Image: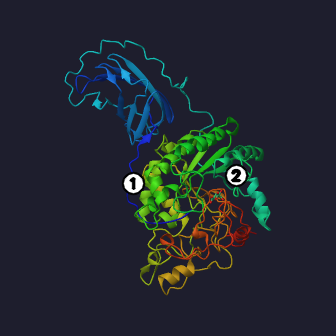
Amino acid sequence: MNVWRRLSGQRRALALAGAGALVAGGLVTLPVTAAHAATQCDVTWTTNDWQGGFTANVTIRNIGDAVNGWTLGWTFPNSSQRVVQGWSAEISQTGSQVTARNLSYNGSLASGASTSFGFNGSWSGSNPKPTSFTLNGTVCNGGTTPTTPPTTPPTTPPTTPPTTPPTTPPTTPPTTPPVGGPRVDNPYLNARGYVNPEWKAKAESVPGGNRISNTSTAVWIDRIAAIEGTDNSQSNGPMGVRDHLDEALRQGVDYIQFVIYNLPGRDCAALASNGELKADELPKYKAQYIDPIKAIQGDAKYRNLRIINIIEIDSLPNLVTNTSGNPGGTAMCDTVKANGAYVNGVGYALAQLGSIPNVYNYIDAAHHGWIGWDSNFTPTANILRDASRASGASAANVHGFIVNTANYSALKEPYVKITDSVNGQTVRQSKWIDWNQYNDELTFAQAFRNELVRVGFDANIGMLIDTSRNGWGGAARPTGPGPSTSVDAYVNGGRVDRRIHAGNWCNQAGAGLGERPTAAPEPGIDAYVWVKPPGESDGSSREIPNTDGKGFDRMCDPTYTGNARNGNSMSGALGDAPISGAWFPAQFTQLMQNAYPPLS
Ligand code: BGC
């Protein structure tokens, strides 16, 4: 976890593999004229559609000279149309532009020969057919320099029927949506959440913990071994993903929350939650982490559970604010930005897990004290959008976003409004707010939701706010505004968030439990949730050797005087903390004492 605010400014254009879409089951044959005499083709496009999805079969007939290697290009007329998964061609999509390339076995097309490929796609609104195609860069339908457009249909039929490609296309393309859906708009509404027995036992080991131990908290899948279950790590119990899902069925609950948290080069701007995968291990992330989770979550026996995945905390915002050119930018953030590990890893997680009809993906979107500045706000929305289109993902795989995960930003600041001014000076110029546009998580979450829709996400996305540790109650909580002697006196006297700096993120002294999980508490907010299980450490306050890959981050050391990312302030961290994820009973006691709303 960590924070920062500065503009990175530059975004990468992402080439997307997969994703696509098509319309109402139709068939269109486009005569393909040639830009130069040698290239001519017919494209036959048949689709099988259902609400939101479709299967396309595309046949290219070469009516020009023989080609050795082909690329078919087209533009989807509707920006929602996405290729999800293809076969018999390598299909990639950037924006609405799609290219399909031959595989090794079907690149040669004799004059008169045909070849077919297909894909599953998604769409919303409408699913129109592309109006033209290019073959190897030459416009097929009304090319720029068609010398002799064909006046008659090609006479030569394919000399050979398409041979069976070695990769197996789906034997029966889906004609109806997968069973188990459709998803509900808000999976938390009128729904009971899973109580993690491992967290419950830890909570009940601390006096008074039984007051909240039946609260639903998320299950963090923070390493490959956590999928099957492990008892040799300091931050996980022996229950694996299947154990938790079975227990959820036994509890008869409606939803269960998992945190997908194992990207290559994880936690690139901090050390406390570094993980097991190296920056270049994206293939391992896919094959040994996401794929096995998909196999379990997709088991038909769990189909009636709403499985909620919180996707990769802190990852994409780090690419905006913690790369070169930003204060405190790190080499690891540069590496995972340059090699695409985060964007493609998140895209893969979204696409794979999002293909399960009862799975709801919420992507992490940092918090107001990180991306609330103008310079970070839109760039972060854009990179989230890019990731949602990477590796075969589409907006349909994103149910919403979560803010404040494992952080401490106050939900509401009742005595300091961002629009307040003191003696003619805006509170935005106080040291605490430091020109941020937001001063609390609720208004930030609602505004960021609008921004996400503006950059291309579905209008019905919902936000979650992690309120596990942002309560800020107890005796030190202000009961009214601060004095109007200066903006700093006003803000510091009235703010309920009592951190030294809004960039402090590790085991914060004085914090309390926040709002208990609640569905649909405010417009645009699907739920207040407890994703960080209260009482689990954010990081060790001194170096502790461990086999979990966890580093020592000085932001967790109470004697640390800070760095560029927290305005060179003291860390505000509690002492004697164990490594991230490990049980920290003293913190749990403090969180209960300072709960807001208070515990009865
Ligand atoms: C740690 C994880 C842990 C999670 C929940 C993260 O900071 O890195 O290992 O599972 O917190 O406590």
The residue to which callout 1 is attached is 11
The residue shown at (19%, 24%) is: 147
In space, the residues marked 1 and 2 are separated at their CA atoms by: 38 Å
The correct choice, above or below, for 425 with respect to 345 in the image is below
Residue 184 visible in the shown view: no
- Quadrant hosting ligand 1: bottom right
Q: Label 1 crowding class (10 Å Cα cut-off): few <14, some 14-19, many 20+?
A: some
**Splitting the image into 4 quarters, where does residue 556 fall?**
bottom right
Q: Quadrant of the N terminus?
A: bottom right
Amino acid type, callout 2: Gly
In the displayed structure image, the side of residue 325 where residue 142 appears, left or right: left
Q: Is residue 410 above or below residue 48?
A: below
The answer to whether marks 1 and 2 mark residues whose Cβ atoms lie closer than 8 Å is no
Vertical arrangement, residue 102 with respect to residue 592, above or below:
above
In the displayed orientation, state which residue is furthest to the bottom.
Answer: 485
Where is residue 288 drawn, in percent x and y? Answer: 60, 42
Q: Position of residue 376 (x, y in %)?
A: 43, 62
Q: Please give the name of the residue rendered at 56% of the width and 44% of the height, measured from the top-left corner.
A: 284
Other residues around mark 2 within 10 Å, as few (<14) / some (14–19) / many (≥20) = many
Say which quarter of the image contains residue 184: top right
Instruction: Name the secondary structure under disc 1.
Output: loop
Q: Position of residue 13 (x, y in %)?
A: 38, 48
- Checking the image for residue 193, the label placed there is 2
